[in-house]
Image: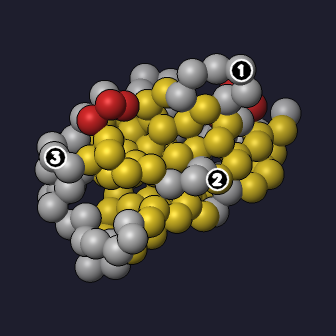
Amino acid sequence: QVQLVESGGGLVQAGGSLRLSCAASGRTFSSNAMGWFRQAPGKEREFVSSISWSAGLIYYAGSVKGRFTISRDNAKNTVYLQMNSLKPEDTAVYYCAAALSPIATMVRSAYDYWGQGTQVTVSS
């Protein structure tokens, strides 16, 4: 059974940092693109960042570019999202996702596996 399990969320003050982790089990995703999405209350789930299988191609949403960094450790079957300079508008449930394609994409429908999400709350 394939599982993606996010961790590292929590409550942080504006300007602070958090590091999210997404550990995959049930199969290896070393040849797959991975991504992070987020969903705030009452809003659509939106793209945050994605990384190709080799980390050679990375995308960021404009709202997080320069503040968030995605990375992966294929040996650990894990993807990370380092979030710095957090803002209250970053408050959301953050979801990890895996695509069947090795190529990074911002398209939500391209992702076939999803985690349950981890809450990130940024206080002002």
Using the image, tell me which numbered label, if any, was put on residue 118. 2
Q: Secondary structure at mark 2?
A: strand
Q: Is residue 53 left or right of residue 73?
A: left
Given the current orientation, which residue lies at the most extreme bottom position? 75
What amino acid does circle 2 point to? Thr
Indicate the quadrant where residue 2 lies: bottom left
Q: Nearer the viewer, residue 26 or 122?
A: 26
Given the current orientation, which residue lies at the most extreme front position? 1
Q: Is residue 16 left or right of residue 112?
A: right
What amino acid does circle 1 point to? Gly
Estimate the x, y position of residue 45 in percent, counting from the top left.
Answer: 53, 28
Residue at 32 percent of width and 63 percent of height: 72
Q: CA distance from mark 1 to mark 2?
A: 17 Å
Using the image, tell me which numbered label, if any, was put on residue 101. 3
The crowding category of the residue bearing disc 3, from other C-alpha atoms within 10 Å (few below 14, some 14 to 19, many at least 20), is some
Location of mark 1 (residue): 42
Q: Secondary structure at mark 3?
A: loop
Given the current orientation, which residue lies at the most extreme right position? 124
> Do we see residue 16 in this rendering?
no
**39 up-or-down from 44: above or below:** below
User: Looking at the image, what colour scheme do you see?
Assistant: secondary structure
**104 up-or-down from 109: above or below:** below
